Amino acid sequence: MDPSVIPWDLTNSIYRYVGVTLIVSNSNTTTLASTIGINVPTSLPSLLPFKAILIIQGVQLNTPQIASDIAQVFGMPSGSFVALTSNPVSLPLSVFGAGLTSTLYSNFVNKLVQGTSNKSLVIGKYTASLLEQSSSGIIFNSVESLTYPLGGLVTATSLSQGIFGTSFDIALGVNSTGVIVLQKNRMDFSQATDHTLNFASVLGLTTALKSTTNETFVTVLPGGAQVTSFSPSTMVIQSSPTATLILGLFPWVGSAERTLPDVSVTFHYPAFDSPVLSASWTTLPTPFYVGQNFTLSLSIANTGAMNAQKLHFDLFYSEAYSWDHPSYYGSRSGTISYDVSSITIGGVDTQSFNFLALSPDAGFTISASYLDDNSFAYSWNTVFSVAAEVKTGPLTVTKSVNPTNPVYGQTGNISFSITNNDPSATFWNMIDLTPEATFFLYPNGIGGGPTPSNGACPNIYNLEANTTQFSFQLSDYSTYCGSGVVTQLWVGNQTNLYPVALQGSIPLGPADTWAPVLHFPAGAAPKLFGSITIQLMLQNYGLVTDSGQIATMGPLPSLGDPNASYLGLNCPLCPVGKGAWSPAFSGDLVNGTGAPISTATVQLSYTDPNGFNNFLGTVITDGMGQFSFSWAGENQLALGNYQFTAAYQGLPPHSPRSQSIQFTVAEPTLIGPGKTVTMSYPYFFNVTGPLTIEPERIAYSTRSNVTIAGNVLSLFGEYEAQSSPATVTVSPPPIFPVVDTTMDTQKLSFLYVAQNQSLVKIMIRVTNNEPLTASKVNVTAFIPRPLCNSYYSQGQWLPVVDNGNVTVDMTRGTVSFSVASLSYGQEASAWYIVRANSTNIFESSTNDTA
């Protein structure tokens, strides 16, 4: 689309040195997340209703004025855009968000339609009604093919990941202003017939399409489509089992305008009459809430030209627990499978499924495939979600900014207090969903994250038995596995299992092996050469089973060393909420047969995030070999990751043993009756003028979790609380030097183009844009280096053939120059010459201090 289709005035001085991307959508934020990147954030998106995202890259001085100007252009109320991030550490980028009503979205649509009505280069001229009635999104870019140097920001716990989800690159990689429209059922595939796609008619073009540059047309058809004709005939076809592509490449040399051919494709699909499936769904009750049971009624209709026979369905679910298919391993996600013998033409199959909502957004994917080999291969799937209603509870949130009169470039502080106004209730899983806060409050993920340790991965081997005893060995697959605790043991044949009495629970560390020799319990009645099956229950894993044969009547070798010691350790309240409660650690000390080692001294210590070891004291095991330790009375720890260690020095006949467990000190996730919790995080004031910082949004629940079939499943987002936005006015800096770069070669759009092996003069200019005189101005710039690295050019910058009046550092690939002082409005410049020695795209960047 023509990059000049921008409804705001780019000649306004506030748009100097910046690139602006505005993304708006009328769809649910999660629906279009994979397409245009509107997803704030990926966790609990229904609690964050931003459907307009404003991204400003470059000099951040005027970003509040830009947000205000764009809001005024589109008829949005004053203060609609609130600052989501303002982070100058890794890259100069600010992000603002706003909610949208249908009227406001109509304002965006009408501005786009007005701006495109007289633009000959606009590819898609959509009507206002089409955009408003379809699931659609509009992207306005002030700079063509804007590129954002994301660097290290795109990580699992980064600010950008929290704001844009995994679609950050897609959202910021769009080429100029564009429109994304999702229209369902544009074509009817219920019966095998010919279809024609004409580019002009699809987009509603009434005049020939003209262009001054290279153009590419792509038509993507479903797998199995038979292409019967296409125009122009110079296009090519590429096919695979899942898709067929018709590609039209229309290169152009020069800058003269030419008329593009009208692209059309005729194809036959489906290849034969077939069923056509579609899904619809309802929930009961409506609405339902987090922690509440709901019934999903799922209907599959057949609108095709023949019956659907022998269907197999898989319903994948997430953020919910299924009551219909419970299992010990039941977690926050799973798959329910069922078969349907037939759905006749025009028929509907309806199934009901019972779930427990674990968060506000339960996601589903229903997939179908045929079991009838005599019919034909068929696959189909639909993704949908159902949202629980979020309640407003007794928690209130207040937010403040310090300092109240910040100056540009200053690092301030956001503080907020959460107060529980209920005199008797405790609330759990309290999470700050504000994107700006996530990076600082939850370094291990939102809500503090789980204790960073691997899960148990038990392995049973060397199962041996005679007619009176049996033995086996149990260990983890590798040292990378987490600890496990054996709580129950059964033995018998393949038909009946009998419980075996254990002397307490058996802890199993990552490098430990348990090798007991045990007697068969009464009733087991083992027989020579008969089968034997053992089954173990692990506290934090589940059931483990192994089978073998009773091979001998003689004695078994003792596989367990009664003189060995085994030390178990766990922390049921990890991660630990800072200042909210004291972590409690407990453990067991037993010998190789599972018998407790009592009255033994266990030394306790912890390692802090800096690697320093801190001794805590000692505890004595009781008659069951158990010990415990509470942090009460110890120093409160700062946020971060720690390692708690219990060590047994060993006394004859028992050998020494030590065990460690990781725990995290995070912001508190629990708030007691009448209590107030205060949190804070830094804020970077890299803008000037009135700045509205988004409200603090807190999610919480009345219960920490639910326990189902031995599984502890957390409840998130049952309630929400929100503060008022915080507004400050940021004073301008007394000096503000800005650097820009130009080259003495042809510029096409945002790219400078040079002939291979030609010489290119690069000019760097610095300007002081604020009233006071800047002294000791230093400018540093990267020598252009390949944007797309090849094997031969990776990490190399262009050779400098003339230093001009800059200092060249070929070790670091930089040039620099200094200016003693720059008064307001004054400029200083420098230059150097490089040789364009390879075919590639090169980029540079600059930095200045004063």
Image (spheres, helix red, strand yellow):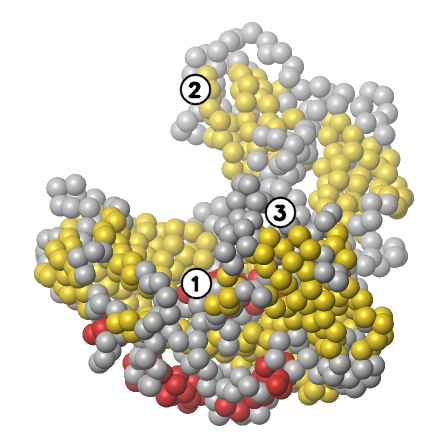
Query: Is disc 2 surrounded by few (<14), some (14 to 19) or many (20+) residues within 10 Å?
Result: some
Amino acid type, callout 1: Ser
Residue name at image x 58 percent, y 45 percent: 794
Counting from the top left corner in percent of width and height, residue 18 is at 60, 75
Instruction: State if disc 1 and disc 2 touch (CB < 8 Å).
Output: no
Amino acid type, callout 3: Gln
Quadrant of the rendering where the N terminus is positioned: bottom left
**Distance between mark 2 and mark 1 Cα atoms:** 53 Å
Quadrant of the rendering where the C terminus is positioned: bottom right
Counting from the top left corner in percent of width and height, residue 531 is at 43, 19
Give the side of residue 831 with respect to residue 340, left or right.
right
Residue name at image x 67 percent, y 84 percent: 691
Q: Which residue is mark 2?
A: 531
**Distance between mark 3 and mark 2 Cα atoms:** 68 Å
Q: Which residue is mark 1?
A: 34
Amino acid type, callout 2: Ser
Q: Which residue is mark 3?
A: 796
Residue name at image x 75 percent, y 52 percent: 809
Give the side of residue 382 with respect to residue 529, left or right.
left
| First of labels 2, 1 by sequence position | 1
Give the side of residue 807 with respect to residue 209, left or right.
right
The picture quadrant where one finds residue 411 is: bottom right
Residue 722 seen in this snapshot: no
Residue 791 seen in this snapshot: yes
Question: Which tag is nearer the camera, tag 2 or tag 1?
Answer: 1
Question: Which tag is nearer the camera, tag 1 or tag 3?
Answer: 3
| First of labels 3, 2 by sequence position | 2
| First of labels 1, 3 by sequence position | 1
- SS for callout 2: strand
- SS for callout 1: helix
Query: Is disc 3 surrounded by few (<14), some (14 to 19) or many (20+) residues within 10 Å?
Result: some
